[in-house]
Image (cartoon, rainbow, N blue to C red):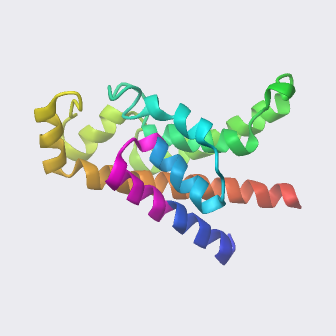
Amino acid sequence: MTSDQNEIAKVAFNKAKQYEMQSGGCPQCTLAGIFDAMGVQDDAVFKAATGLADGVGLTGDGHCGALSGGVLAIGYFFGRDKADFGDLMKLVKANLLSKKLHDRFVEKYGTCRCADLQTAFFGRFYNLYDPEEMKAGMKAGLLEKCSTLVGEVAKMTTEIILEAQAKDAK
């Protein structure tokens, strides 16, 4: 990667981490960091990511919301439009890049499931619907750990997008 690309990825990390610390909603924070770093304004994609937090609907029972946000960003840049719905090559490309993100994520964290990540980080899962559980999670460092993870996923995703764009430009 070029120094400019590294700088863009670093901005994505910092913005995403900051958003998670301030606002929560890991998929939206990941998207916001990536989109800010890459100069994208798309509230529809951002809004659509809302329910993917904490493994879907704050349940922990699904893959990490930050990973969902990263996959949405990849789809934004490389996915099919409805007009291209029959274009299997665009389907394949977006999925190959999403798999690359998934594989990097699992290599770094050992799993992509939200509840399993919390258990690995803290020895247990925190039910964020329960105010006492939420307080306990915050006291244990959930916000700091998850905001760093969100930043890392934004960085990984941005690197994948920039590498793919550079390859396409050749």
Work out whether residue 4 can be spotted.
Answer: yes
x 21%, y 34%: residue: 126
> Where is residue 107 drawn, in percent x and y?
47, 48
Magenta stretch prevailing secondary structure: helix
Segment colored magenta? 13-27
Query: In the rendered view of the protein, which quadrant contains the N terminus?
Result: bottom right
Work out whether residue 66 can be spotted.
Answer: no
> Where is residue 21 drawn, in percent x and y?
33, 55
Res 116 → quadrant: top left
> Where is residue 147 drawn, in percent x and y?
35, 53
Pick the front one: 122 or 143: 143
Q: Is residue 38 above or below residue 57?
A: below
Res 100 → quadrant: top right
x 53%, y 59%: residue: 155
Q: Is residue 51 above or below residue 69?
A: above
Residue lying furthest top: 86
Pick the front one: 72 or 163: 72
x 41%, y 43%: residue: 26
Residue lying furthest right: 170
Residue lying furthest bottom: 3
Within the magenta stretch, is there residue 9?
no
